[in-house]
């Protein structure tokens, strides 16, 4: 019993020593973490930390510059790719454009054979720009005023809205009526069809009669009608079915001819008023003499 009593304190001492050792180990670890969190205190530690920060900043800036350059390169490549896609539609010789302009006034009778529809946009775009210039000249001659915007913006908006909007409408109707024609062909067909509008506006502005609109209606029927018949013949040759042909031909003929009437009467009315004023001779009233006495009118007082 005495031995057991003597050995018990020894176990407590050993356990106490072991516990104290664990506590010392934990204290050392916590102090080490605290010291590491505070950072190195000697001069060599500060230098290594600054180098790490500089290296990280350099890597981040390099990565940002690389990403920005990659995005710009992708945008440039995509833009070049889009231009390269449109390049075949503008690859045309001047004599071919001249021939197609003349052919836009030579309609053909619709038959079972498909009439050729060009896949080219250079000529139609030049025709639209010419129409814009003529419309701008007509606006300036008529002293037309725009409340919001400019005359140039109005001319661009009117012409391009008609070109793109009518092409989109005709493409939708062609899809519904099962006509074998693409959107590029419709844009080309409508663009060359505006050549008649250019001729009518030019002659109607330079040679204008103030008494009636007979000269304008003659131009409208001849040049506008020929260009309209040309477009109608191309579309009819690519459409099957009587009802489908009637819908497409009436729609494009009505829109094309009404647009020419709009261009004339919307921006040409002031020219007519000016011409009437210039052509009219003012009548000067002579004073009346009654019994050798000259009467004075109210306007002379």
Image: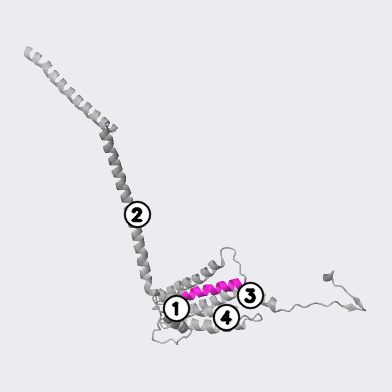
* Residue 114 image-quadrant placement: bottom left
Q: Earlier in the sequence, mark 2 or mark 4?
A: 2
| Residue 255 position (above or below residue 222) | above
Image: magenta residue range: 126-142
User: What residue would you read off at disc 1?
Assistant: 189
Label 2, label 4: how many angstroms apart (C-alpha)? 55 Å
Q: Nearer the viewer, mark 4 or mark 1?
A: 4
Q: Is residue 52 left or right of residue 158?
A: left
Q: Is residue 25 left or right of residue 167?
A: left
User: What residue would you read off at disc 2?
Assistant: 68
**Residue 266 shows in this picture:** no
Q: Is residue 9 left or right of residue 246?
A: left
Q: Earlier in the sequence, mark 2 or mark 1?
A: 2
For the C terminus, the image quarter is bottom right
User: What residue would you read off at disc 4?
Assistant: 203
Identify the disc placed on residue 74.
none
Q: Earlier in the sequence, mark 3 or mark 2?
A: 2
| Residue 74 position (above or below residue 187) | above
Label 4, label 3: how many angstroms apart (C-alpha)? 14 Å
Instruction: Assign a secondary structure to mark 2.
Output: helix
**Residue 126 shows in this picture:** yes
User: What residue would you read off at disc 3?
Assistant: 271
Q: Residue at x 54, y 84 (%)?
A: 222
Label 1, label 3: how many angstroms apart (C-alpha)? 31 Å
Q: Earlier in the sequence, mark 4 or mark 1?
A: 1
Instruction: Give yes or no for contact between labels 2 and 1 (Cβ–Cβ under 8 Å).
Output: no
Instruction: Assign a secondary structure to mark 1.
Output: helix
């Amino acid at each position: 019993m005495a031995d057991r009593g003597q050995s018990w304190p020894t176990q407590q001492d050993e356990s106490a020593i072991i516990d104290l050792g664990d506590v010392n180990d934990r204290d050392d670890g916590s102090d080490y973490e605290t010291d590491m969190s505070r950072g190195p205190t000697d001069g060599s530690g500060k230098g290594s930390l600054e180098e790490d920060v500089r290296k990280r900043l350099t890597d981040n800036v390099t990565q940002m510059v690389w990403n920005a350059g990659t995005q710009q390169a992708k945008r440039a490549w995509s833009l070049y790719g889009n231009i390269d896609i449109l390049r075949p539609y503008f690859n045309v010789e001047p004599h071919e454009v001249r021939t197609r302009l003349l052919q836009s006034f030579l309609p053909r009778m619709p038959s079972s054979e498909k009439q050729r529809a060009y896949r080219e946009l250079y000529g139609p775009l030049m025709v639209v720009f010419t129409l814009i210039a003529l419309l701008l000249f007509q606006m300036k001659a008529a002293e037309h005023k725009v409340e919001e915007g400019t005359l140039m913006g109005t001319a661009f908006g009117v012409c391009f809205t008609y070109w793109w909007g009518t092409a989109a409408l005709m493409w939708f109707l062609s899809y519904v009526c099962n006509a074998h024609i693409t959107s590029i062909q419709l844009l080309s067909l409508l663009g060359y069809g505006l050549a008649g509008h250019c001729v009518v506006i030019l002659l109607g502005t330079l040679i204008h009669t103030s008494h009636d609109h007979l000269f304008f209606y003659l131009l409208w029927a001849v040049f506008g009608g020929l260009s309209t018949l040309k477009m109608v013949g191309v579309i009819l040759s690519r459409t099957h079915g009587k009802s489908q042909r009637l819908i497409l031909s009436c729609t494009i003929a009505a829109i094309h001819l009404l647009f020419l009437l709009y261009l004339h009467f919307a921006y040409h009315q002031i020219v007519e008023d000016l011409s009437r004023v210039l052509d009219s001779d003012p009548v000067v009233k002579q004073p009346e003499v009654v019994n050798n006495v000259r009467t004075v009118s109210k306007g002379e007082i």
